[in-house]
Amino acid sequence: MDVTIRAYRQTDAVDLAEVMWRSVREVAVTDYTREQVEAWLPERLSPDTMHMWASSGREVLVATDSGGRVVGYTDLESDGHIDHLYCAPEAVGEGVAAALCDALEALAASEGVRRLQVEASEAARRLFERRGFRVDSRREWELRGVLIHNYVMSKAL
């Protein structure tokens, strides 16, 4: 899939909320139970919530397909933390996440970030491991009364 990576615009908020919803509800179910997925994201985030998140001092990168449709996004906080990396189900396995990661790592390097860190889901763990991240620990906690897990991962730049 040919994608363009660009900076977030306020008009992307609706699309980011939809990509996140579909990614969790349609992709994460391959690695997590339905109960875990529903605890993770019980409802779609509103465009206002997404815009507040994207405007909170982080840099958000958006992947669009050849028709200009948002198919993925990620972010970088000033300390090198990656909070979100989500792709639409039809973009999974099409190189979209890799393109977002390439752009994210280039951005981090240009800003003098020396280390990236992320709390990755099962699917994201596999992607980040292929990109040279290491698993620092497996994290398990209760979310909305449901046990769920992810992986604390990091990579030196």
Image (spheres, rainbow, N blue to C red):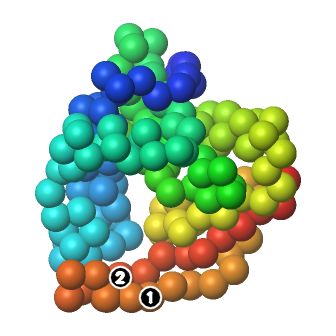
**Please, what is the three-letter code of the amino acid marked with disc 2?**
Ile
- Percent across and percent down for residue 91 are 42, 36
Secondary structure state at the residue bearing disc 1: strand
Q: Label 2: which residue? A: 148
Q: Is residue 85 visible?
A: yes
- Percent across and percent down for residue 70 are 38, 26
Q: Quadrant of residue 16?
A: top left
Q: How many marks?
A: 2
Q: In the image, is residue 121 above or below residue 3?
A: below
Viewer-nearest residue: 49 or 40: 49
Mark with earlier residue (2, 1) = 1
Q: Residue at x 63, y 84 (%)?
A: 137
**Please, what is the three-letter code of the amino acid marked with disc 1?**
Glu
* Label 2, residues with CA under 10 Å away: few <14, some 14-19, many ≥20: some
Q: In the image, is residue 97 above or below residue 127?
A: above
- Percent across and percent down for residue 148 are 35, 82
* Label 1, residues with CA under 10 Å away: few <14, some 14-19, many ≥20: few
Q: Residue reaching furthest top?
A: 67
Q: Residue at x 44, y 20 (%)?
A: 65
Relative side of 66 to 37, left or right: right
Can you tell which mark lies on residue 140?
1
| Tags 2 and 1 touching, CB below 8 Å | yes
Q: Residue at x 44, y 88 (%)?
A: 140
Can you tell which mark lies on residue 97?
none
Relative side of 68 to 129, left or right: left
Q: Residue at x 69, y 80 (%)?
A: 136
Secondary structure state at the residue bearing disc 2: strand
Relative side of 2 to 88, left or right: right
- Percent across and percent down for residue 146 are 24, 86
Q: CA distance from mark 2 to mark 1?
A: 6 Å
Q: In the image, is residue 30 above or below residue 107?
A: below
